[in-house]
């Protein structure tokens, strides 16, 4: 069995995530944005997405203003070429945020 709960990594406490905001964490040298709004986690070409805007269901990259949908990481506006990858995430009852790196 792979991708189970045992493979998830503790990356943050939910209290660290502002409502509707994001926080970058690093897993295996890859920056991953945690977004509280959609209980989602995304990476994006190393850009510090947590310094961009998260509003109206969109994530806007601070570097070239590419826009993505929070719900599923879909590309909404160029110049970015691809949608964001999405990683499974789980919030534990004690406020621990876990992400599966797979
Ligand atoms: S690095 Fe994010 S839009 Fe260019």
Image: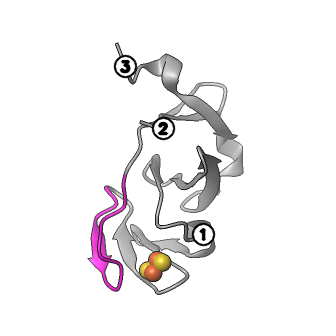
Q: Secondary structure at mark 2?
A: loop
Q: Nearer the viewer, residue 60 or 15?
A: 60
Q: Are marks 2 and 3 in contact (CB under 8 Å)?
A: no
Give how far across and how far down residue 48 sits, in percent.
60, 69
Q: In the rendering, which numbered label is found on residue 2?
A: 3
The circle on residue 101 is 2
Secondary structure beneath disc 1? loop
User: Which residue is more in the foreground, 10 or 81?
Assistant: 81
**Pointer 2 residue Cβ closer than 8 Å to ligand 1:** no
Q: Find disc 1 in the rendering and name its residue.
A: 48
Q: Which residue appears farthest toward the top when viewing the image?
A: 1
Taking the image as shown, residue 62 lies to the left or right of residue 94, namely left
Q: Which residues are magenta?
A: 72-85
Q: Residue at x 57, y 27 (%)?
A: 92
Horizontal and vertical percent for residue 39?
A: 46, 46
Residue positioned 64% across, 51% down in the render: 25
Disc 1 Cβ-to-ligand 1 distance below 8 Å: no
| N-terminal label among 3 and 1 | 3
Q: Is residue 35 above or below residue 91?
A: below
Point out the frontmost of discs 3 and 1: 3
- Judging depth in this view, the residue of 29 and 52 nearest the camera is 29
Q: Residues within 10 Å of mark 2 (few under 14, many from 20)?
A: some
Vertical relation: 59 (above or below) 78: above
């Amino acid at each position: 069995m792979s991708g189970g709960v045992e493979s998830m990594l503790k990356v943050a406490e939910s209290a660290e995530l502002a409502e509707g905001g994001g926080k970058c964490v690093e897993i295996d040298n890859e920056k991953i944005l945690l977004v509280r709004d959609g209980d989602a986690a995304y990476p994006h070409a190393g850009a510090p997405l947590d310094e961009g805007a998260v509003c109206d269901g969109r994530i806007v990259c601070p570097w070239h203003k590419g826009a993505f949908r929070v719900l599923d990481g879909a590309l909404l506006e160029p110049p970015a070429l691809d949608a964001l990858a999405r990683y499974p995430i789980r919030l534990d009852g004690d406020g621990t945020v876990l992400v599966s790196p797979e």
